[in-house]
């Protein structure tokens, strides 16, 4: 299956997301694959058999969100220089969202910008992180606060790579699938309630649906100036959780699952989401053993961290909330007392 992403802005190249169509990647230039030891051990040989290039180098970086930082980014750049990549060279991101974000960031700044290709190997990356051109790293202030918008040349989503995913990694990807359904497609949500993603065919259909939704959103709003912000449903809360736990306790999708529940409780307080809908979303997340609870130590500290969210502007905190299942509301006018009341619920 092929999903095209076309931009109105002619300065940005359009590209395709190909699902289970990776046959050959033919490039008449130097290539460097950026990956980690886990993915390399499982799948690198398979990928190398599909690459036809003038020269192919391997850049290996540590595995995990805690390594998504300046130090690792600099390591990637230094190895690009060591291998004498030039402006025509291409980086290939081969891994999950961390690898994709860092490789894209490195590509966007290496010699003022070179091409890169996404070959995501986790469910989360295939349904969300690899599509749309967001790149970045974390710092002590929060997640993805340093980065660029840099679209890939192409994205190849191969479901065969998902067969080796640990259960936690698989479930983390499901959180992003639920996110898409709740905010954009009620029928898709109903389908998820009645169809297991442990079925290979169902999984392929869900990936295709998510890519189609995201392609439409990104095509209309590349730089997150409007509707694309909706893709951050659950993330405003999740990024605080990840930062507070030093990116060690939760996978990104697990934090998003908790963030979705927090956002839903806020939506319920505002009359946007019914009790029944709140329960259905939480139950669907629980079906895949995703966490839905979190213990907040200080509501004020958690609240203050919202101001570091990239969507916040002019001292207003922007929240993406479900408005029933299948619709959304973007709010930056919520009284602090209501937000603190929601956070208070997670102290117990």
Image (tube, helix red, strand yellow):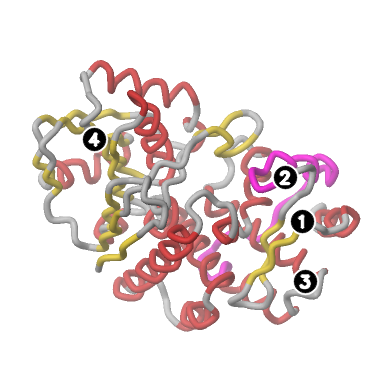
Tag count: 4
Which of pointers 3 and 4 lies earlier in the amino acid sequence? 4
Q: Give the residue pinned by disc 2.
A: 313
Which of pointers 1 and 3 lies earlier in the amino acid sequence? 3
Q: Secondary structure at mark 2?
A: loop
In the picture, the disc for residue 332 is 1
Q: Tell me: residue 291, above or below residue 86.
A: below
Disc 4 from disc 2: Cα separation:
35 Å
Q: Tell me: residue 194, above or below residue 218.
A: below
The segment highlighted magenta reads 285-312
Q: Is residue 183 left or right of residue 79?
A: right
Looking at the image, which residue is at 81% across and 39% down? 301
Disc 2 from disc 1: Cα separation:
9 Å
Which of pointers 4 and 2 lies earlier in the amino acid sequence? 4
Q: Give the residue pinned by disc 4.
A: 90
Q: Give the residue pinned by disc 3.
A: 268
Q: Are marks 1 and 3 in contact (CB under 8 Å)?
A: no
Q: Is residue 19 left or right of residue 256?
A: left
């Amino acid at each position: 299956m092929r999903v095209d992403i076309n931009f109105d802005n002619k300065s940005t190249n359009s590209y395709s997301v190909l699902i289970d169509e990776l046959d050959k990647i033919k490039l008449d230039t130097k290539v460097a694959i950026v990956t980690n030891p886990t993915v390399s051990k499982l799948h690198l040989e398979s990928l190398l058999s599909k690459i036809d290039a003038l020269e192919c180098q391997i850049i290996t970086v540590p595995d995990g969100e805690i390594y998504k930082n300046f130090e690792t980014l600099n390591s990637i750049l230094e190895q690009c220089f060591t291998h004498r990549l030039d402006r025509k060279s291409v980086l290939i991101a081969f891994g999950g969202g961390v690898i994709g974000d860092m490789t894209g960031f490195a590509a966007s700044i290496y010699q003022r910008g070179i091409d890169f290709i996404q070959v995501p190997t986790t469910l989360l990356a295939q349904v969300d992180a690899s599509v749309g051109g967001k790149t970045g790293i974390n710092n002590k202030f929060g997640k993805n606060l340093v980065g660029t918008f840099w679209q890939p040349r192409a994205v190849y989503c191969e479901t065969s790579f998902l067969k080796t995913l640990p259960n936690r990694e698989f479930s983390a990807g499901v959180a992003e699938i639920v996110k898409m359904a709740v905010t954009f497609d009620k029928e898709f949500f109903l389908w998820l309630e009645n169809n297991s993603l442990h079925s290979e065919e169902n999984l392929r259909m869900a990936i295709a649906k998510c890519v189609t939704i995201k392609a439409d959103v990104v095509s209309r709003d590349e730089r997150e100036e409007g509707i694309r912000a909706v893709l951050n449903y659950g993330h405003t809360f999740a990024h605080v959780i990840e930062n507070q736990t030093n990116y060690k306790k939760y996978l990104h999708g697990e934090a998003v699952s908790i963030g979705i529940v927090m956002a839903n409780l806020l939506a319920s307080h505002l009359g946007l989401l019914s009790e029944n809908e709140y329960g259905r979303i939480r139950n669907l997340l629980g079906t895949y053993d995703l966490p839905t609870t979190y213990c907040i130590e200080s509501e004020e500290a958690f609240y203050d961290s919202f101001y570091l969210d990239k969507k916040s502007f002019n001292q207003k905190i922007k929240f993406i909330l479900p408005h029933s299942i299948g619709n959304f509301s973007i709010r930056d006018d919520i009284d602090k007392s209501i937000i603190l009341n929601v956070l208070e619920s997670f102290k117990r």
